[in-house]
Image (tube, rainbow, N blue to C red):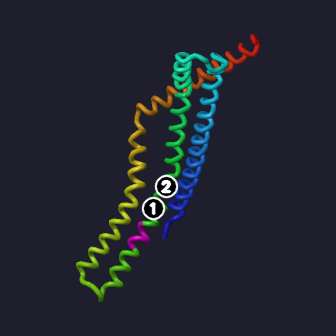
Amino acid sequence: MPDSSTSLSNADASTKVATLARLASWLVRGVGVFAIVSLLAGLGTWWTLFGGWPTYGVAQLLAVGFAGLLLLPAGVLALFYQGLRDLMKLPERLRGQLDVDKDAAAQAARTMRADAGKSSRLWRFVKGLWALRTAVMDSKGLLLRYGAMIRFINPWSLLAVLAATGATFVLSAMAVVGGMLRLLLG
């Protein structure tokens, strides 16, 4: 029988986990909003500097390159946002996959018991292994996807996110100040 201190610590842990989940949700939402702000800052800076699309061939090529450069921080932040969203959904997906795996293992066990009188042990063993192989292959796709995502969580990608954040602040300031000047000067 658990004592009251154990249940109290479990309740505290549950409260802390719920608080952490709420904070993580706010972080993900904030990164998404910041990615949109970065996009608007890049477009605003473009409008401030050029006001329109150039009509000459070489100028258009340079304009496309410069627009890509201005929108690069928004792209980096959008990718970071998508990775955070996928990471937030990981526990639910793993829980769902574990349920599928448990059902597949139970089905394999039922198949082996149902065939107990009809076939040899070797054949039942092979069929059971095949059913478990199918369950593992289904899990493998999910784990490979998140394994690839974790590979991108390294100091360089986090440095790129910090650089994109700094660039967003600079672009926002340029868009606001330049936009005011452009509106005032005409």
Tell me which residue sits at (66%, 20%) in the image.
52
Q: Earlier in the sequence, mark 1 or mark 2?
A: 2
Q: Please tell me whether mark 1 sits on a helix, a strand or a loop.
A: helix
Q: In the image as oriented, which residue stretches furthest toward the bottom?
A: 117
Work out whether 162 lies above or below 95. above
Location of residue 49 in the rendering, given as x and y in whole percent from the top left corner: 63, 16
Q: Position of residue 12 (x, y in %)?
A: 56, 54
Image height of 19 relative to 119, above or below: above
**CB under 8 Å between discs 1 and 2:** no
Look at 65% across and 23% down and name the residue there: 44
Binning the other alpha carbons within 10 Å of mark 1 as few (below 14), some (14 to 19) or many (20 upward) gives: some
Give how far across and how far down residue 175 sits, in percent: 65, 20
Task: Give residue 179's quadrant in the image.
Answer: top right
Residue placed under numbered mark 1 in the picture: 97
Instruction: Give the left or right position of residue 119, taking residue 175 as reference.
Output: left
Instruction: Reply yes or no: does residue 31 show up in magenta.
Output: no
State whether the magenta stretch is mostly helix, strand or loop: helix
- Point out the image quarter for the C terminus: top right
> From mark 1 to mark 2, how far is it between C-alphas?
10 Å
Image position, residue 48 (x, y; %): 66, 18
Looking at the rendering, the stretch of residues picked out in magenta corresponds to 101-105
On the image, numbered disc 2 is attached to which residue? 91
* Nearer to us: label 1 or label 2: 1
Q: Residue at x 72, y 16 (%)?
A: 180
Give the residue type at disc 2.
Answer: Pro
54 or 80, nearer to the observer: 54
- At horizontal 54% and vertical 40% (from top left) the residue drawn is 81
